[in-house]
Amino acid sequence: MNTLISEEAVIEKVLEGERIDKDDALELYKLPLEELGALANHRRKAAKRPAYGGRGNEIVTYIVERNINYTNVCNVYCKFCAFYRTESDADHYVLTQEQIDRKIDELVGIGGVQILMQGGHHPKLGMDYYLDLLGHIRSKYPQINIHAFSPPEFNHFSEVFGMSLRDIIVRFREAGLGSIPGGGGEILVDRVRKRIAPLKCSTDQWLEVMEIAHEEGLRTTATMMFGHVETIEDRIEHLERIRQLQDQTGGFTAFICWTFQPENVVLKATPVGSAEYLRTQALARIYLDNVENLQSSWVTQGPRIGQVALGYGANDYGSVMMEENVVSSAGTTFRLSRQEMQQLIREAGYEPHSRNNVYQLLD
């Protein structure tokens, strides 16, 4: 097949709003970065045009939340993680309800609406710790959405508690869990997962948690951490698996991708730059035609590249994070205030608006 004709045909599919396949994605990946970005922006406009009373193209959203890592004890030893500790490490911890309350009080004080709560795979915390914590937060802070516990954590809970995934998810939902983050997705290709996190759940296990959550009425996000040992084909396969589940359930609210951070970790890989981040995000916007929202990853790329990403398919600037421990442990420590985030969005030509977990505007 003539490459030029193939590229033209794929570009036409994108412009006409047609679904692309894996071969199409490989062709798009070869395009000049600015051309791919323009196509992603075209798809972003099509996806957001109906939103917010027809003003979705003009608006970029963000959320005011706080990351809370309730424990750093973990027994899966991911090679890309600099955050985890074992119970024998002097700086291991499990937060008490009082410590978590203080963090949420600070969030409420700046008008926050959500906590993103994740931890390690602690081998000794029982069901009561989690149910009591969820019930306590829901009772004391009913205005705060609890966006918590990634699919690998739920698989870990299933093993430790000796319960089915569905039973755990239902009980957590009834206790106060509001939604589930897409952490632990990394690359949804088992060959890659076995190299970077051999003790973590498989691709199918990650997807099963999300499928059950969607069936039980919990919305979730989808993520991808790339730029380490995976191939371009692996990234596309990851997007395919997300798209397939979204076709089935419609439960993903957003997709977020970020790059591997190399400092203080066991995994040795050459990190990719901002251009590769923008290329991958743009490709994700085009491929994930059934996921309405894409978040810019300023946390790993920095505020300015996060701003540029708004022209490469992203319609959301992510979170005003009062606290971030995992990525910063691997050497990246960008911070933004609410005012700085609003200014960056305005400079990019959009209206900044805060939102909740399901992308309803709050201002």
Image: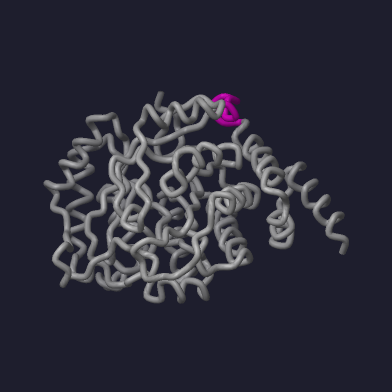
Q: Which stretch did the figure color magenta?
A: 50-58
Q: Quadrant of the C terminus?
A: top left
Picture coordinates of residue 205, whole percent (x, y): 44, 69
Looking at the image, residue 359 lies above or below residue 164: above
Decide if residue 159 is on the left or right side of residue 193.
left
Q: Quadrant of the N terminus?
A: bottom right
Q: In which image quadrant can residue 201 be found? A: bottom left
Decide if residue 41 is on the left or right side of residue 126.
right
Looking at the image, residue 55 lies above or below residue 27: above
Q: Which residue sits at x=16%, y=60%?
A: 93
Whether residue 303 is in magenta: the answer is no
Decide if residue 20 is on the left or right side of residue 136.
right
Dominant SS in magenta: helix
Picture coordinates of residue 282, whole percent (x, y): 62, 47
Q: Which residue sits at x=36%, y=66%?
A: 265
Picture coordinates of residue 143, whole percent (x, y): 27, 34
